Image: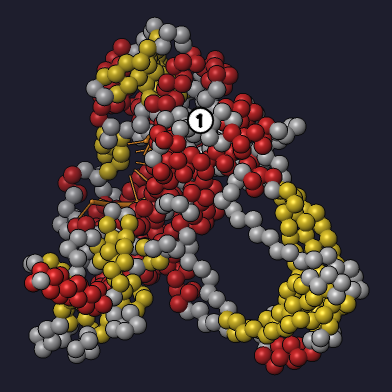
DNA sequence: GCAAGGTC
């Protein structure tokens, strides 16, 4: 029997139907696979095993943290059903072909399956096929010339697994213990999450330390004497000095002369095809990236969109774009599809990243709105509109730039009008911003209808939106197309971050501060960069997995040797105490703090027992004390977070007073 | 109860 192993169910199905006739679907203990004559095709679920420390390391308080650095590591089965099926089929196999994804992680996933197969059938013959698209041509070609498994490449991926586990588990336990945050309140640390968190914390610090500086801008409205049309122009200089600004403002007389007019017709190319990052970034205006990914996964499973995890922004030549548009012209986006079909030639837009993994995300079926949930429809519509837009005509803009001089002061106006919407008629998520500036000839004398001097303040850099952060992570090499959204979800569920745009909690600031104090490497993208380089060298045979892991262990050991654990623990605890500080007590002005009692949690006065002021808190959800203060009570606003989402309770005192008022009203009603 | 990476 010939056993073929793929990375997931869908590719198993596709490959079986491409290679064989009379394919039968079978199902055993919840796992579906495919057979034909002597061949069996089984899809895994990505990794079916997971590295971990054995059970004897489970006690976070009793096991010394540093013993994890050289602790034993075992492979635990995470997909029991698949592993059982694999073992059962492997016994009958005389040939095994590994057909997992053609990348580093895919090689390891294949080796994991192979280890399971060999545990019951050690002498089975094994080969490996590599394909970069699941088209009949590519698949047949790959199966015509099988190669062998690349164990060095799999080793590279395993080195990453080991290093991530050792560093992550050791530092997570260390910080959690140092701060006495055990149980579900633990403080997590990792090669990807910590640098990402640091980005957020650093942006917040920039905002806090930002000193707004004044600057002045001068505007004038000019009027044409022939048509009476007017337009707004802005002084070409942004003034940092008030005196100079006032002088320039006063010099502007009651007329000006157009000294330079430039008119241009500008072509605006369509947006590039969606890869995961661009897709999540666009979808983040409707929902969180992890929700968007979830919905996309569903649509993919139902045959409505292509595989949503891809780095590629260039359509492969094997994709029949026109055919897909024709299909779409029969569905709810017929109008948009017709716009594309009416072109003489369809030339697709292309993005910067061309990779061979999967095509960009495109619609693979026609959806019925009534059969989809709201979110599903939103995502489907987004994918369809983006796809059609990438095949549509340019948008065309008429731009006009006018420079007017009045008594030696120069002002300018920029007008742009969309003369043809092109792809923008289809991709409606970006607003068409038009500004009208009337035609003006050089030398034309214009009347100054109005002039004004505005004082403005410089503003700090903005906080990150989830979409921006995912793009930034990609740029810095943090995480992968499949994990970036999950990293953000993780930071949310650990109450390290909240809100949109994203803000860090006090805990996050404390964690980043102490990590950068004693284990700076793990808070920087460089660790990933170095690891990538080392993995390449392992794959090339220039380094061994053992050597790379050993070097990494030594670095971590050195960190613990040179750290004053007691001192670090003190400063971390000190900083975390702020997290409980809610603001001044309205009765005695001492600090109000979050306290726990047997009945639950509440806000109490630190002056207790002299002051017995208290405020209630909701029973469920995690409490986040934000940086914003109530204007009436100076208490910090509170958010409640549960299952990745959060809502604002506002000022706890205002909230309490409102509740009292409500209760009294209800009471009156009942008496009547 | 730890990481990050696959996939559902």
- What residue is at 19 percent from the left and 72 percent from the top? A662
Residue A57 x/y as whole percent: 19, 49
Dot 1: within a 10 Å radius of its alpha carbon, few (fewer than 14), some, or many (20 or more) residues?
Answer: some
- What residue is at 88 percent from the left and 77 percent from the top? A445
- What residue is at 67 percent from the left and 89 percent from the top? A241
- What residue is at 70 percent from the left and 93 percent from the top? A243
User: Position of A66 compared to A194: left or right?
Assistant: left
User: Position of A6 compared to A657: left or right?
Assistant: right
Q: Can residue A102 be seen in this view?
A: no
Please tell me which residue lies in front, A658 or A552.
Answer: A658
Please tell me which residue lies in front, A515 or A316.
Answer: A316
Q: How many labels does the image show?
A: 1
Image quadrant holding the C terminus of chain A, namely bottom left
Q: Is residue A369 visible?
A: yes
Residue A570 x/y as whole percent: 26, 75
Asked if residue A111 is positioned above or below residue A207 in the image, the reply reads above
Secondary structure found at label 1: loop
Please tell me which residue lies in front, A117 or A66.
Answer: A117
The residue lying furthest to the right in this view is: A443
Residue A78 x/y as whole percent: 27, 35
The residue lying furthest to the top in this view is: A37
Asked if residue A298 is positioned above or below residue A601 in the image, the reply reads above
Asked if residue A444 is positioned above or below residue A541 in the image, the reply reads below
Q: Name the residue under label 1.
A: A366
Please tell me which residue lies in front, A267 or A549.
Answer: A267
| Res. A586 image quadrant | bottom left
Image quadrant holding the N terminus of chain A, namely top left
User: Position of A40 compared to A74: left or right?
Assistant: right
Residue A26 x/y as whole percent: 32, 16
| Res. A330 image quadrant | top right
Name the subunit of mark 1: A
């Amino acid at each position: 029997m010939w056993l073929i192993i793929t990375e997931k169910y869908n590719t198993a199905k596709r490959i079986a139907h491409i290679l064989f006739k009379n394919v039968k679907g079978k199902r055993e203990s919840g796992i579906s696979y495919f057979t034909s004559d002597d061949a069996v095709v089984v899809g895994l679920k990505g990794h079916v095993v997971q590295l971990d420390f054995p059970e004897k390391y489970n006690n976070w308080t009793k096991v010394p943290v540093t013993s994890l650095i050289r602790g034993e590591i075992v492979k635990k089965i995470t997909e029991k059903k698949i592993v059982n099926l694999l073992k059962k089929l492997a016994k009958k196999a005389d040939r095994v072909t590994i057909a997992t994804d053609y990348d580093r992680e895919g090689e390891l996933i294949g080796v994991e399956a192979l280890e399971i197969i060999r545990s019951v059938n050690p002498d089975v013959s094994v080969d490996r096929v590599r394909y970069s698209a699941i088209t009949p041509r590519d698949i047949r070609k790959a199966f015509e010339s099988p190669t062998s498994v690349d164990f060095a490449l799999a080793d590279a991926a395993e080195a990453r697994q080991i290093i991530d586990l050792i560093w992550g588990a050791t530092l997570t336990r260390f910080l959690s213990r140092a701060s006495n945050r055990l149980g579900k309140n633990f403080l997590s640390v990792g090669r990807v999450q910590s640098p990402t968190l640091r980005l957020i914390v650093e942006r917040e610090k920039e905002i806090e330390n930002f000193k707004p500086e004044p600057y002045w801008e001068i505007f004038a409205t000019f009027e044409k004497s022939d048509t009476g049309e007017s337009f707004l122009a802005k002084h070409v200089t942004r003034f940092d000095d008030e005196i100079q600004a006032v002088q320039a403002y006063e010099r502007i007389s009651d007329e000006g002369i157009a000294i330079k007019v430039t008119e241009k017709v500008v072509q605006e190319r369509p947006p590039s095809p969606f890869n995961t990052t661009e897709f999540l970034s666009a979808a983040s205006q409707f929902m969180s990236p992890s929700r968007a990914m979830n919905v996309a996964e569903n649509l993919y499973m139902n045959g409505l969109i292509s595989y949503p995890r891809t780095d590629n922004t260039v359509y492969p030549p094997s994709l029949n774009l026109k055919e897909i548009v024709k299909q779409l012209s029969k569905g709810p986006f017929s109008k948009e599809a017709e716009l594309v079909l009416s072109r003489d030639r369809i030339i697709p837009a292309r993005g910067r990243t061309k990779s061979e993994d999967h095509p960009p995300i495109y619609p693979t079926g026609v959806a019925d709105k009534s059969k989809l949930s709201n979110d599903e429809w939103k995502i489907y519509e987004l994918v369809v509109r983006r796809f059609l837009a990438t095949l549509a005509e340019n948008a065309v803009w008429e731009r006009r730039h006018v420079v007017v001089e009045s008594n030696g002061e120069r002002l300018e106006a920029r007008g742009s009008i969309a003369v043809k919407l092109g792809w923008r008629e289809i991709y409606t998520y970006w607003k068409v911003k038009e500004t009208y500036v009337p035609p003006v000839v050089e030398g034309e004398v214009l009347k100054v209808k109005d002039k004004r001097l505005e004082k403005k303040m410089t503003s700090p850099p903005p906080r990150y939106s989830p979409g921006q952060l995912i793009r930034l992570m990609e740029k810095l090499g943090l995480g992968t197309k499949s994990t970036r959204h999950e990293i953000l979800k993780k930071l949310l569920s650990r109450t390290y971050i909240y809100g949109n745009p994203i803000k860090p909690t006090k805990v996050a600031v404390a964690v980043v501060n102490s990590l950068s104090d004693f284990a700076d490497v793990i808070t920087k993208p460089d660790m990933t960069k170095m690891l990538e380089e080392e993995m390449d060298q392992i794959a090339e045979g220039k380094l061994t997995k053992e050597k790379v892991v050993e070097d990494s262990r030594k670095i971590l050991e050195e960190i613990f040797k040179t750290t004053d654990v007691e001192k670090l623990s003190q400063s971390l605890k000190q900083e975390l105490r702020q997290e409980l500080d809610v603001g001044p007590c309205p009765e005695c002005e001492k600090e109000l703090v979050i306290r726990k009692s047997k009945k639950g949690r509440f806000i109490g006065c630190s002056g207790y027992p002299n002051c017995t002021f208290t405020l209630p808190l909701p029973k469920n959800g995690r409490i986040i004390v934000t940086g914003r203060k109530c204007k009436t009570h100076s208490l910090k606003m509170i958010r409640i977070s549960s299952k990745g989402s959060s809502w604002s309770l506002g000022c706890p005192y205002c909230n309490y007073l409102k509740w009292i008022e409500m209760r009294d009203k209800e009471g009156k009603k009942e008496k009547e």
